[in-house]
Amino acid sequence: MNALTAVKPPKLETVTIRVEESGRIAFKGTITTENPSADVGAFMLALHKAALADKRDSVEIDVSGLTFVNSSAIRLFIDWASWLRIPGKPPPYVLRICASRTITWQKTSFMALRSLAAGIIQVHEVD
Amino acid sequence: MRFRPAWAYIDGIREFGRFFCQTTFGTAELAERARLIIQETLENAVKYSSKSPESELELMIRASDDVIEFAVSSFPDPAHMENLKKELDGLNARDPEQAYLAAFERASTETQASARLGLARIRYEGGVELSLREEEGGRVCITASGKL
């Protein structure tokens, strides 16, 4: 077992998060809580630290099952990208995001994030 | 719809609004826009509402011809009013996509501040324009209006 797959996802009412053996992290449901940084954000930070400890080249997250989120949840993805931005250096790993091309918030948010974090984030669109 | 400014009500009211728009206007696309607009306008109103007993929120959904309006009236903390006006002025000075990208950029550089993506998201993702009206007694109404 490596550090990434050992990270335990939080148990939440409206979203299911699964860390697969491959290291891929899948989200399903909705996130509309007032302060998602307290649980989902803390989980993402733990994944980031584990990815650094494992010296990974990339981390893959699948958000295509995340049908609706509020802007505080979108902020969590922006934060993750900012952890990977080290001035003058390449990112320690690439964040690969599997997103749905049919879910509006995913199309708009990851378009914006991709333009802001080129080379840090890769978005793979699925139906 | 009138209710106390409590976070616990937002999910239920948002999903009712989505169902209402889907059922009344028959388009999934409008229902999705309604879902987003209601979520973000109510979140904003709940977060910044005064703690006074008269600080009820009111959500109105109104359609005429080819325009739909979502109006959220609240009784905000006066300290928040100037920030809200400034935020709206800044957003309305740019086209929706540019304002949305600028909000992302700001969130990525001001990592300790709150997200402040909601209003830009409403305009761009929701396909509406936002306006603010101050009412008697300190109430404020934010209206999101766009094509049906």
Image (tube, rainbow, N blue to C red):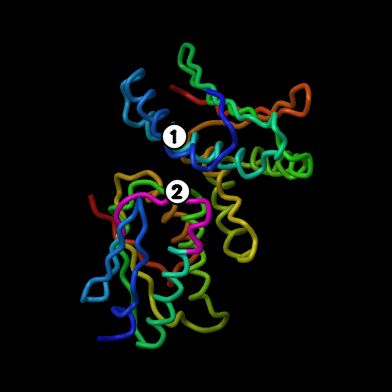
| Chain identity of mark 2 | A
Instruction: Check disc 2: other Cα within 10 Å, few if <14, some if 14-19, many if 20+.
Output: many
**Circle 1 sits in a helix, a strand or a loop, which is it?**
helix
Name the spot of residue A10 as percent of width and height, x first.
37, 65
Name the spot of residue B51 as percent of width and height, x first.
70, 40
C-beta proximity under 8 Å, tags 2 and 1: yes
- Magenta-tinted stretch: A27-38
Q: Which mark is residue B14?
A: 1
Residue that label 2 marks: A32
Q: Which mark is residue A69?
A: none
At horizontal 47% and vertical 60% (from top left) the residue drawn is A115
Most foreground residue, B81 or A16:
A16
Name the spot of residue B52 as percent of width and height, x first.
72, 36
Which picture quadrant has residue B49? top right
> What residue type is disc 2 on?
Thr
Instruction: Please identify the quadrant where the N terminus of chain A is shown.
Output: bottom left
| Chain identity of mark 1 | B
